[in-house]
Amino acid sequence: MLVTRELSKEYRSGENRLAVLRDVSFSIPQGAFVAIVGPSGSGKTTLLGLMAGLDTPSHGQVLLDNADLTAMDEDQRAKLRGQKVGFVFQSFQLISTLTAIENVQVPLELRGESGAADRARELLGRVGLADRLDHFPTQLSGGEQQRVAIARAFANAPRILFADEPTGNLDSETGARIVQLLEELNRESKTTIILVTHDHTLASRAQRIIRLSDGRVVSDTETERAA
Ligand SMILES: Nc1ncnc2c1ncn2[C@@H]1O[C@H](COP(=O)(O)OP(=O)(O)OP(=O)(O)O)[C@@H](O)[C@H]1O
Ligand SMILES: [Mg+2]
C-alpha cells in the first residue's frame, strides 16, 4: 500500500515561491495499476519522485507499506528503494559502464539467482533488443535505453514500479509491447504500477486514473478495467 497525505512541494527562487504540488492525498493498494495524467507542468514527475522517495516534500507524508519515507534520511530511503522500488525514468536509469545485458543481469546476480545471463537475454528479447545486448547505454537510442530499463525492472520484480512516460519515446508498435510487459508484471508479480503518461490509450489500460492540474488532484476515477 502506498499512501500520500497532504503532500506539498514548493520551490523557492529568490523571493518567489512556486507551489508545484498542493495537498495531494490518496492511497494505492498493493497490485494496483494507476495512471497519473495532466497537463505539462502540472506536477506529475514531481509527484512520482516524491512517491518513489527520490525527493522530499515541503509538507506531508509518503507511506510505503507503512514505512514513512518522509521520516527517513537519504541512506534509509535508498535502502528501501533497493528493496522495493523499480523505476523507468527518462533520466536516472542505466549504469553507464555496463552493457545492456549487464544492466539487466547484475541485479539478478546480486540477488544470488542462478541463470541470470539467460534470464537477462530472454527479457531483452521480449523488449525487442536481442541484437543490442552488448551495447553500452550511450550506444543506444533513448527508446532503447527505456526498454533496457523496463527489462531490468521486470528482472527485479519490484513491489512497486514507477514509470514516467514509459512509451513516450517509442513508436506505437514498441509502445504496445511495453504496455503488454507492464501488464504482465502487474499480473504475474502483483507489482503495483504507477505511471505518468500523456498517452490516452496507455492511460485507459490502467484501473485508475488520477488527474493533476496545477499541482492538485482534480479527479481520481476507476476505469472499467478496475477489478
Ligand atoms: N527543481 C525545480 N526548481 C524549480 N521548479 C521546478 C523544479 N522542478 C520542477 N519545477 C517546476 O514544477 C512544475 C511541475 O514540474 P513537473 O516536472 O512535475 O511537471 P510534469 O507534470 O511532469 O510536466 P511534463 O508533462 O511536462 O513532464 C513545473 O512548472 C516546473 O517548472
Ligand atoms: Mg514530467
Image (spheres, helix red, strand yellow):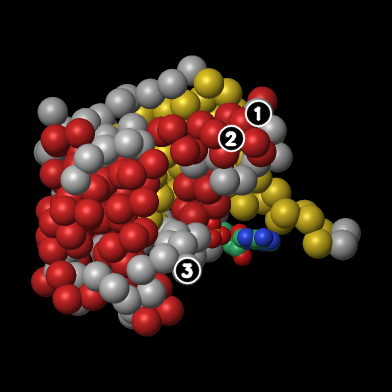
Residue at point 54%, 34% (across, down): 79
**Mark 2 crowdedness (10 Å alpha carbons): few <14, some 14-19, many ≥20:** many
Q: Nearer the viewer, residue 227 or 113?
A: 113
Helix, strand or loop at disc 1?
Answer: loop
**Mark 3 crowdedness (10 Å alpha carbons): few <14, some 14-19, many ≥20:** few
Residue at point 36%, 51% (across, down): 106
Residue located beneath label 1 in the image: 72
Q: Amino acid at mark 3?
A: Ser
Helix, strand or loop at disc 3?
Answer: loop
Residue at point 62%, 52% (across, down): 20
**Which of the 4 image quarters holds residue 142?**
bottom left
Within 8 Å of ligand 1, the CB of disc 2?
Answer: no
Residue located beneath label 3 in the image: 96
Residue located beneath label 2 in the image: 77
Where on the image, by quarter, is ligand 1?
A: bottom right
Helix, strand or loop at disc 2?
Answer: helix
Q: Are marks 2 and 1 in contact (CB under 8 Å)?
A: yes
Does 176 appear above or below 181? Answer: below
Q: Amino acid at mark 1?
A: Met
**Mark 1 crowdedness (10 Å alpha carbons): few <14, some 14-19, many ≥20:** some
Residue 50: percent from the left, percent from the top? 55, 42
Q: Earlier in the sequence, mark 2 or mark 3?
A: 2
Within 8 Å of ligand 1, the CB of disc 1?
Answer: no
